[in-house]
Image (cartoon, helix red, strand yellow):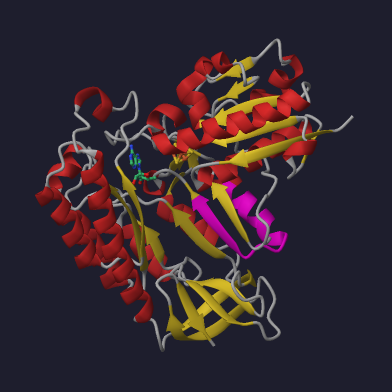
């Protein structure tokens, strides 16, 4: 009998893609996907450990899943992903979880599901040096059928001192370039018009076989060559690794979108050294200048952390001044969260008081909101080619879609349908949307 699996996904896009891999593995094990928790025999949360509040939220969900178990004792609850890897059997000790599976162990799911019962919880949190799930065709869970995410690598070899990811996702490994191209061809054949290549640090992608070596720029060329009307995006870039070759490759291919997500984390070189980012403020600004000299229209977004260990007002001001100087289109901004086991956790003091962290974060957010509005308003009068995604959330008479630089546009529907390209002119804007005609 077919059983139903319900999965909630937390954290990054990589996790969204992992959920698609999990659905594919579960399908082969006789499960079908449901979006209703109440009818599922298997409830999974694909989890994130990046900040403490991410984990707290998932702890709340475990309580909700437990209510389902009380009503239907046969229901199985599983925690998979980064929090499974970080907490391991501590999750089983709650008595509310039957299954704990780390990011490199999803192929064990059928075996674990055979063996599991509420009296016999199962765990597999082995990390791998090889696993890339290259041969697994993800069951796409996006709703629009236009834009697909493709993992090109797993794990991370950087040791940013604040970050838990190297511990939860293990060592970096790059996926077979031809399997990536096959997957991109496959989604294009099914009507998708955009692929986003995903990795913790795409610039260090490197795949070798006996016959060839493929770096990230080479991979971009291979995927861009599939079809001129297939857009290629990627995330995340690392400022220390983004090469001129990648920048020139983007510039040379109109279907590689003009957008780079380039997390800066801090504008203070002292903080960047403590964070072990392996670049300083000047290096970052030089990379931005290079990108803009080659592609003046390139969208730039970033991540910023407020209140890292020992951060002074002067360091904080350096972050504000860098953000002011660069003028990012958009930023993800966080208060520093001490994560057990990281280098910062073991060797530094989380000594910026919570109220100071929050005040600095608010100043960062306020500045970015002003900058976003400036950047979006500067687009008024510009023309953009937009890939139509679907109806606008606010006004169903309008459609929405992204410009190459990743800015969201809304525009009149006309005869357009999802998957079409259309040229629009920007007539107005908010700080997050271009209003177009
Ligand atoms: N505290 C706050 N933010 C963090 N990030 C990573 N680790 C932490 C942490 N311990 C942020 C970084 C990263 C993004 C994905 O999350 O900005 O780029
Ligand atoms: Fe993604 Fe990092 Fe969260 Fe893991 S910890 S899900 S890699 S954001």
Q: Which residues are magenta?
A: 180-197
Quarter location, residue 357: top left
Using the image as rendered, state which of residue 74 and residue 150 is in the foreground.
74
Q: Residue at x 62, y 20 (%)?
A: 96
Using the image as rendered, state which of residue 193 and residue 162 is in the foreground.
162
Q: Is residue 35 above or below residue 47?
A: below
Answer left or right for 312 relative to 251: left
Quarter location, residue 40: top right
Is residue 296 visible to us here?
Answer: no
Where is residue 280? Give x, y as percent.
17, 49
Is residue 11 visible to us here?
Answer: yes
Where is residue 91? Give x, y as percent.
54, 20
Tally of numbered tags: 0
Using the image as rendered, state which of residue 364 and residue 106 is in the foreground.
364
Where is residue 347? Give x, y as percent.
20, 24
Where is residue 400? Give x, y as percent.
58, 73
Image quarter (top left, top right, bottom left or bottom right) of the C terminus: bottom right
Quarter location, residue 144: bottom right
Q: Residue at x 31, y 32 (%)?
A: 338
Answer left or right for 235 relative to 118: left
Answer left or right for 176 relative to 250: right
Q: Ligand 1 is found in which quarter of the picture?
A: top left
Q: Residue at x 73, y 24 (%)?
A: 70
Residue 319 part of the magenta-drawn span: no
Q: Is residue 180 above or below residue 54?
A: below
Image quarter (top left, top right, bottom left or bottom right) of the N terminus: top right
């Amino acid at each position: 009998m077919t059983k139903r699996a319900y999965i909630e996904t937390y954290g990054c896009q990589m996790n969204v893609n992992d959920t698609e891999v999990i659905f594919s593995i579960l399908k082969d094990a006789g499960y079908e996907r449901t979006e209703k928790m109440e009818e599922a025999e298997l409830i999974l949360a694909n989890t994130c450990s990046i900040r403490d509040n991410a984990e707290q939220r998932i702890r709340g969900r475990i309580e909700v899943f437990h209510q389902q178990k009380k009503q239907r004792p046969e229901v199985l609850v599983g925690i998979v992903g980064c929090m499974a890897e970080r907490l391991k059997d501590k999750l089983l000790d709650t008595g509310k979880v039957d299954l704990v599976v780390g990011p490199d162990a999803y192929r064990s799911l059928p075996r674990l599901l055979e063996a599991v019962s509420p009296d016999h919880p199962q765990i597999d949190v082995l990390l791998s040096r090889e696993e890339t799930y290259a041969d697994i065709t993800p069951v796409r869970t996006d709703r629009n059928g236009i834009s697909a995410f493709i993992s090109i690598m797993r794990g991370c070899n950087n040791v940013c001192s604040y970050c838990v990811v190297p511990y939860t996702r293990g060592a970096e490994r790059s996926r077979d370039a031809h399997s990536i191209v096959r997957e991109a061809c496959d989604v294009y054949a099914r009507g998708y018009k955009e692929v986003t290549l995903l990795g913790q640090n795409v610039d260090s992608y490197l795949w070798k076989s006996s016959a060839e070596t493929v770096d990230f720029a080479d991979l971009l060329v291979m995927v861009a060559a599939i079809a001129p009307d297939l857009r290629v995006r990627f995330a995340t870039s690392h400022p220390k690794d983004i090469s001129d070759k990648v920048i020139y490759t983007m510039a040379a291919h109109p279907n590689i979108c003009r957008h780079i997500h380039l997390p800066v984390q801090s504008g203070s070189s002292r903080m960047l050294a403590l964070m072990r980012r392996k670049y300083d403020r000047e290096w970052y600004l030089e990379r931005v200048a290079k990108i803009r000299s080659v592609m003046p229209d390139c969208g730039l977004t970033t991540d910023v952390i407020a209140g890292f260990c020992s951060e002074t007002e002067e360091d904080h001001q350096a972050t504000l001044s860098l953000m002011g100087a660069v003028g990012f289109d958009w930023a993800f901004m966080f208060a520093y969260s001490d994560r057990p086991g990281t280098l910062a956790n073991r060797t530094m003091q989380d000594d910026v008081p919570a109220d100071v962290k929050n005040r600095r974060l608010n100043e960062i957010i306020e500045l970015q909101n002003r900058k976003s509005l400036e950047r979006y308003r500067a687009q008024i009068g510009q023309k953009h080619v937009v890939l139509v995604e679907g109806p606008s959330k606010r006004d169903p008479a309008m459609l929405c879609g992204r410009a190459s630089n990743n800015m969201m546009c809304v525009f009149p529907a006309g005869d357009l349908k999802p998957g079409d390209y259309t040229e629009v002119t920007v007539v107005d804007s908010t700080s997050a949307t271009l209003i177009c005609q």
